[in-house]
Amino acid sequence: MNAPVGTFDLAALLAARGGERYELHGRHINPQLPRMLRTIGFDKFYERAEGAYFYDADGDDYLDMLSGFGVMGLGRHHPVVRKALHDVLDAQLADLTRFDAPPLPGLLAERLLVHSPHLTRVFFSNSGTEAVETALKFARYATSRPRVLYCAHAFHGLTAGSLSVNGEHCFRDGFAPLLPDTAVPLGDLDALERELRKGDVAALIVEPIQGKGVHEAPPGYLRAAQELLRRHKSLLIADEVQTGLGRTGDFYAYQHDDGVEPDLVCVAKSLSGGYVPVGATLGKEWIFRKVFSSMDRVVVHSASFGSNAQAMAAGLAVLAVLEDEQLVANARRTGEELRNRLAALAGRYEMLHQVRGRGLMIGIEFGRPSSLGLRGRWTMLQAARKGLFAQMVVVPLLQRHRILTQVSGDRLEVIKLIPPLIIGEREVERFVSAFTAVMDEAHSGGGLMWDFGRTLVKQAVAQR
């Protein structure tokens, strides 16, 4: 059947209005976004993307070491995922009828559960924060307890339930009251046990490696926490939204600790292939059977676009690519090479304090220098606002070396690297060479970097 010819022409629209992108955002969406991007010189016009690279109108390439906050685990526009989406659209499936059991969700659930054999059920939603919301609801219902523990500095999402277990005040302030919750330090088993003794804890939710600052749970912590939780009849929720699907060199980051079997696991981001938003909450049989305990409760928890055919096809394609291209092993191997090469620079640069992480989730932390001249400049930045030195590094990486990175959190002197899992020696060499050049300039005590630093200081002071 031939589709009717309409007036909508996407290519023509982008050609006519694409140059207004920053003005349109400022006028109709978030006015602070274009303002922030222009301030730090990130207001680029990217025209296309492929693999681990963006390209501007001049054809210059930009290395993506951010992967859309982890969404682009396979890089941009992977051909296998693209074909899967073309195929599912061309199939014209009877999707989201609400009164059938389509095959794609079952097939994707089956493939996901292979990697967590102790889990048996999956609920599909549309994002990482929805996957967390699902886990929180299921844990509270299954245990008949109200309170959820989380770790200080955790993220987990920004919707109301997920915000309740978000460890950063900059996100929480002004949105109270939230769900009953309590923060415990990551790795502190005594603090965890003190809260569990109160008898009202449904679960502990934890990122095996925290996105903010790239802080890893200490070895053995997850296993010991699991034992405590089981003793007190509480659940362990692993938030693998960013760390899952190979990011840290194992399929899930919790698998770095032997014997850890979370009751609920949240995934999203990379499962989308970078195309169709998708979230998934994996869980134990008894939890799902308690939530969906009768036909009366068949839709007690649901998502309007959950399990849609496009998202399921993208997820199946992603899992196939991870296996066929051995990207989990590549993340482990390439991540170790990148981390080791960066760590070797610590003795060369006094403001480079630590390189940490696992796989292709790496944190580069800066700190107070020892030499008098650099210490004065460092103190100036810190007095204005913490995190400005890391921003000073991120900006020239993009502007001079065409490499996109991010500061790992508000007021942190940490850069986080979460590149696509497809990168190899070429990208490692490019990043290390660029980072070395930026650090050479930073430690020279002058130049454009410190001129930009003074600009950041003035802006930080003016905003107080």
Image (cartoon, helix red, strand yellow):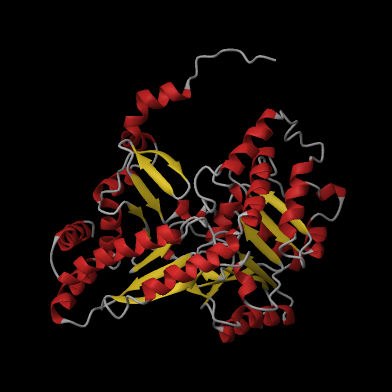
| 232 versus 390 height, above or below | below
| Between 90 and 278, the one nearer to me in the picture | 90
Q: Nearer the viewer, residue 27 or 140?
A: 27
Quadrant location, the C terminus? bottom left
Q: Residue at x 76, y 48 (%)?
A: 107
Q: Please give the name of the residue rendered at 62% of the width and 69% of the height, measured from the top-left corner.
A: 148
x and y, in percent, of residue 157 in the image: 53, 57
In the depicted view, which residue is nearer to us: 174 or 215? Answer: 215
Outermost residue toward the right in this view: 294
Which of the 4 quarters of the picture holds residue 206? bottom right
Please identify the residue farthest to the front as the structure is shown: 425
Q: Is residue 226 left or right of residue 55?
A: right
Left or right: 285 in relation to 267: right
| In the depicted structure, whether residue 229 falls above or below residue 406 | below
Which of the 4 image quarters holds residue 207?
Answer: bottom right
- Please report the residue visible at 59 percent of the width from the left and 65 percent of the height from the top: 329
Q: Is residue 248 visible?
A: no
Q: Is residue 250 visible?
A: yes
Quarter that holds the N terminus? top right
In the picture as drawn, the residue positioned furthest to the bottom comes out as 190
Q: Position of residue 267 (x, y in %)?
A: 62, 57
Q: What count of labels does the image hold?
A: 0
Q: Is residue 220 above or below residue 67?
A: below
Q: Position of residue 185 (x, y in %)?
A: 51, 78
Residue 78 percent across, percent down from the top left: 55, 44
Q: Say if 183 sits above or below 284 in the image.
A: below
